[in-house]
Amino acid sequence: MKYAPIFITATNTNVGKTYTTLKLLEALSAKGLRVGVMKPIETGVLDVPLDATLLFETAKRFHPALAQLSLKEIVPYCFELPASPFVAKGRKKVSVEVLQKAYEKIASLCDIVLIEGAGGLLVPIEEDLYMYDFIRLFEAKTLLVGHDALGCINDILLNLHLLDSLGVEDYEWCVNFKEERESFDKITLPFLKKTFGRVLSVQDNMPLIVKSLVTNGDMNGDVL
Ligand code: GDP
Ligand code: MG
Ligand code: MG
Ligand code: MG
């Protein structure tokens, strides 16, 4: 069974994209799916690409056939400078064809592929290519991961407005409780709950997040 890939983005770098992707990997693998991973671009890579390596090694544990791929196929572009790809790549070009081919190869071995972005949606890659373009490029559903500290309402709303204005419909958002959980309930939850009715978190609601993002188009949207 083939499912649309999930593009994992966040309100900022270090919010928990990799962490959330690993949780999704676990949850989907437990449902019997063959799950692939991809990190199209990783920056700040001195020696090994840390995100891609962690994703790839974990994915191989659940789906050993992925071992026929190389790390380079999981992360086609690595740049040394810890900066946006636009800056970090210098004169190199990021080719969407290369990325698409890499995705197709991973997807051919899997039921679903989890694609981790770099930074957030408005991170620049080329003059005419931003991180949010990966949603359309890979025809992916999107999971926005929000941080849980003061300011997250603004950061989450900005991202949701951007997704809406881009015409992206298949997205879900959640909060990753890294450390601010108690104060979140006090200072943030009241607004988000009133506005959205519910607030999903990586910690408590992975089954609902999966249900919301993994649907089979061939079966009239039946959820997994
Ligand atoms: P990314 O840059 O958005 O991919 O963020 P990461 O997933 O790499 O998370 C950044 C750092 O925070 C890493 O050191 C993670 O191990 C840590 N981290 C992320 N989410 C959690 C969480 O929910 N709980 C804890 N304890 N650590 C977390
Ligand atoms: Mg982040
Ligand atoms: Mg990171
Ligand atoms: Mg990461």
Image (tube, rainbow, N blue to C red):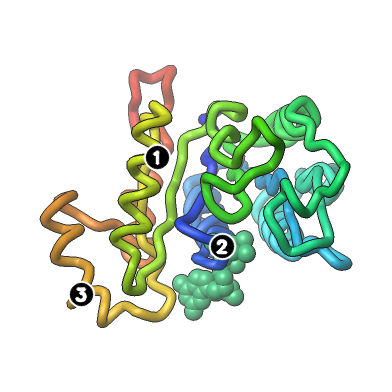
In which quadrant is the C terminus drawn?
top left
Which is more toward the observer, 48 or 34? Answer: 48
Per the image, label 3 sits on a secondary structure element best described as helix
Residue drawn at 65 percent across, 34 percent down: 129
Q: Give the vertical position of 36 relative to 177 (above or below).
A: above
Q: Is residue 112 left or right of residue 57?
A: left
Q: Quadrant of ligand 3?
A: bottom right
For label 1, the residue is 162
Distance from disc 1 to disc 2, alpha carbons, whole Å, reads 17 Å
Q: Position of residue 141 (x, y in %)?
A: 47, 35
Identify the mark at residue 220; answer none if there is no mark.
Answer: none
Which is more toward the observer, 164 or 9? Answer: 164
Mark with earlier residue (1, 2): 2
Residue 127 in view in this figure: yes
Q: Amino acid at mark 2?
A: Thr
Q: Position of residue 33 (x, y in %)?
A: 55, 41
Q: Is residue 183 left or right of residue 81?
A: left
For label 3, the residue is 187
Q: Is mark 2 within 8 Å of ligand 2?
A: yes
For label 2, the residue is 13
Distance from disc 1 to disc 3, alpha carbons, whole Å, reads 24 Å
Q: Is residue 54 left or right of residue 32?
A: right
Q: Amino acid at mark 1?
A: Leu
